[in-house]
Amino acid sequence: MKNTTLCYLSRGDEYLMLHRVKKKNDLNHDKWIGFGGKLEENESPEEGILREVREETGLCLTDLRYRGIVTFISDEAEGEYMHLFTAEHYEGEITDCDEGEIAWIKKVDFAALPQWEGDKIFMKLLEDGAPFFSLKLRYEGDRLAEAVLDGRKLL
């Protein structure tokens, strides 16, 4: 299982999002997601997300909230533990990203954008201010086949 990070930056009623359209053979192609990536050797989740956000956006996060861990299981890809963060404050100017297009998206419009079904579950938890959570998402191809929140089956 690989370890990755993901962060959602917010500004009032908007999220800063990445529309994954630039990389070839991208598992997330055409999806709207937050910012993050794989942890490097000897890197904590916090160090990894700070580095990834800086690399992908040019922004330096000045607050960071560790919100949960998402376990991804797939019949088509390696398993993954994703450390999920949110942030509201940052410094710097947004730069271009080689993985996709960066845009501020209204929170009310986000659900209508192309995204993974499981992302809708953890985004609702984030929006509702849920305490730290553990979410297991199992995919069969692109279809969400199972969702388990803190040991309770949702799907």
Image: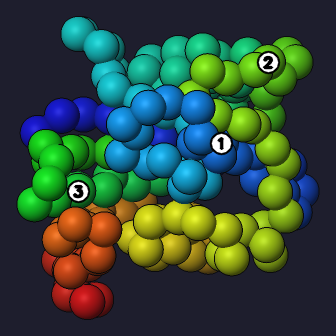
Q: Residue at x 65, y 46 (%)?
A: 19
Residue nearest the viewer, comparing 83 with 119:
119
What distance separates the C-alpha of mark 1 from that of mark 2? Answer: 12 Å
The location of residue 135, given as percent across then percent down, is 29, 66
Residue nearest the viewer, comparing 43 with 2:
2
Helix, strand or loop at mark 2: loop
Residue 61 position (above or below residue 82) = above
Which mark sits nearer the N-terminus, 1 or 2? 1
Residue with the mark numbered 3: 72
Q: Residue at x 60, y 15 (%)?
A: 55
The location of residue 129, given as percent across then percent down, is 60, 69
Q: Is residue 76 left or right of residue 129?
A: left
- Number of residues whose C-alpha sits closer than 10 Å to that of mark 2, classed few (under 14), some (14–19) or many (20 or more): few
The location of residue 24, given as percent across then percent down, is 44, 32
Asked if residue 59 shows in the view, the reply is: no
Residue 106 position (above or below residue 7) = below
Helix, strand or loop at mark 3: strand
What distance separates the C-alpha of mark 3 from that of mark 1? Answer: 20 Å
Residue 107 position (above or below residue 82) = below
Residue with the mark numbered 2: 95
